[in-house]
Image (spheres, rainbow, N blue to C red):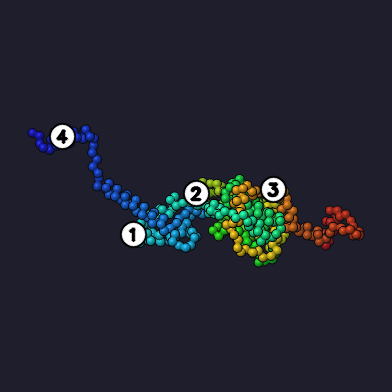
């Protein structure tokens, strides 16, 4: 005789056969769902909190996340440190958000933070140019020589072009060299003052031309490299310098990375020296625009935004940012005043001079005669 249990078992079997198996939720699944929901709420609350009080951005050059408090009067962003992260976490917890350090880190070092390129952003956000030629006025603070004023303007166009990233095929391969045998003319100060305040951290006068990896990184990171005390560069490094100056792009492998990746050239070169006789290779002098500084340079009141707005406007209208062959020849002729003579030439001029009209006993000096005379002096 069938029991009630047998009858119920048959009904259950027929139900399963017609409807398929029934899954009974495990107790832990409910807990997991509640945990996931709580995590989503926490994440959303934390993101809202962070976005309301702090502005974050990811610097593509330094590969650092930077931040500033929105309620602060300071406009400057600062790289986020571990101390900053701890402070942010504590502040969030004080508002009732039960977050941990890892929750803050996850957001700060994620792609939720917008990327920016310091130089591209600066050039994009410039005001409209008001039409006044401030670039030529800036050049005249150093010298009023027409070749210098025109050459400096052309060099500044090339510098701005690299900052904008508008020409990846050619590099700014010329360097202005400010020359003054007097101290205190503010040559180095003028070089640094070419940088807008928001970009001054991308200026350097620390250069080791022999450090290949370091130089490649600096060409892609800095906006302006000052070859301070240019005369101290040995002649054997001039070919190396010219190679760096002509390099339009590099392939670099960053720390802890497995692969090389292309890095566009960003930096331009400028130089200063207290020695007038500094060039040794006449054929390579077209790479340097030497100018003699006669008095102290006024470095005050430089209107960076309008200067770079002018350069941007001129580039967008097709203004040339490279030097023609005729311009390079003019630069080489001007640079003749800055060549340093070899010792042999100094000795020769100490012993001989060119004949002048009216001189008596003028003789044509052969090489043999010169060689015989010089040792006896």
Q: Earlier in the sequence, mark 3 or mark 2?
A: 2
Label 1 crowd (10 A; few <14 / some 14-19 / many >=20): few
Of circles 1 and 2, which is in front?
A: 1
Q: How far from the left and from the top, in percent, is residue 162?
A: 59, 50
Q: Would residue 221 be visible to someone looking at this image?
A: no
Q: Residue at x 62, y 63 (%)?
A: 299
Q: How far from the left and from the top, in percent, is residue 208?
A: 61, 56
Q: Earlier in the sequence, mark 4 or mark 3?
A: 4
Q: Nearer the viewer, residue 312 or 342?
A: 312
Tag 3, which secondary structure?
A: loop
* Residue that numbered label 2 is attached to: 257
Estimate the spatial distance between the alpha carbons at disc 4 and disc 3, rounded to whole Å. Answer: 99 Å
Of circles 3 and 2, which is in front?
A: 3
Q: Residue at x 69, y 65 (%)?
A: 295
* Residue that numbered label 1 is attached to: 96
Q: Earlier in the sequence, mark 1 or mark 2?
A: 1
Estimate the spatial distance between the alpha carbons at disc 1 and disc 4, rounded to whole Å. Answer: 56 Å
Tag 2, which secondary structure?
A: loop
User: Residue 324: which numbered mark, if any?
Assistant: 3
Q: Nearer the viewer, residue 104 or 195?
A: 195
User: Residue 10: which numbered mark, if any?
Assistant: 4
| Left or right: 26, with 144 as reference point | left
Estimate the spatial distance between the alpha carbons at disc 3 and disc 1, rounded to whole Å. Answer: 66 Å
Label 2 crowd (10 A; few <14 / some 14-19 / many >=20): few
Estimate the spatial distance between the alpha carbons at disc 1 and disc 2, rounded to whole Å. Answer: 40 Å
Q: How far from the left and from the top, in percent, is residue 273?
A: 67, 61
Of circles 2 and 4, which is in front?
A: 4
């Amino acid at each position: 005789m069938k029991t009630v249990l047998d009858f119920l078992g048959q009904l259950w079997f027929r139900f399963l056969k017609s409807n398929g198996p029934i899954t009974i939720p495990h107790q832990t699944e409910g807990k997991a769902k509640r945990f996931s929901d709580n995590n989503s709420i926490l994440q959303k609350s934390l993101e809202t909190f962070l976005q309301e009080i702090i502005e974050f951005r990811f610097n593509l050059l330094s590969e650092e996340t930077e931040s500033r408090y929105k309620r602060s009067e300071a406009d400057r962003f600062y790289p986020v440190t571990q101390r900053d992260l701890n402070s942010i976490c504590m502040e969030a917890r004080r508002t009732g958000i039960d977050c941990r350090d890892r929750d803050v880190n996850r957001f700060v070092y994620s792609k939720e933070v917008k990327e920016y390129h310091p130089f591209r952003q600066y050039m994009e956000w410039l005001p409209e140019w008001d039409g006044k030629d401030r670039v030529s006025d800036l050049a005249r603070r150093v010298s009023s020589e027409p070749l210098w004023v025109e050459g400096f303007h052309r060099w500044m166009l090339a510098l701005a072009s690299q900052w904008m990233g508008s020409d990846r095929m050619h590099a700014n391969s010329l360097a202005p060299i400010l020359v003054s045998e007097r101290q205190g003319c503010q040559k180095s100060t003028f070089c640094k003052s070419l940088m807008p305040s928001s970009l001054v951290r991308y200026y350097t006068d620390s250069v080791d031309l022999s450090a290949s990896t370091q130089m490649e990184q600096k060409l892609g990171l800095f906006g302006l490299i000052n070859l301070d005390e240019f005369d101290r560069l040995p002649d054997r490094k001039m070919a190396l310098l010219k190679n760096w100056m002509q390099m339009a792009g590099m392939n670099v492998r960053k720390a802890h990375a497995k692969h090389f990746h292309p890095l566009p050239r960003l930096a331009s070169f400028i130089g200063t020296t207290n020695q007038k006789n500094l060039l040794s290779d006449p054929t390579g002098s077209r790479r340097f625009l030497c100018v003699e500084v006669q008095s102290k340079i006024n470095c005050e009141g430089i209107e960076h935004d309008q200067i770079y707005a002018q350069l941007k406007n001129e580039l967008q209208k097709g203004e040339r940012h490279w030097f023609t062959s005729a311009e390079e020849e003019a630069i080489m002729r001007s640079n003749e005043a800055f060549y340093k003579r070899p010792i042999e030439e100094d000795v020769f001029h100490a012993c001989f001079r060119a004949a002048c009209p009216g001189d008596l006993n003028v003789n044509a000096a052969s090489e043999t005669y010169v060689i015989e005379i010089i040792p006896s002096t």
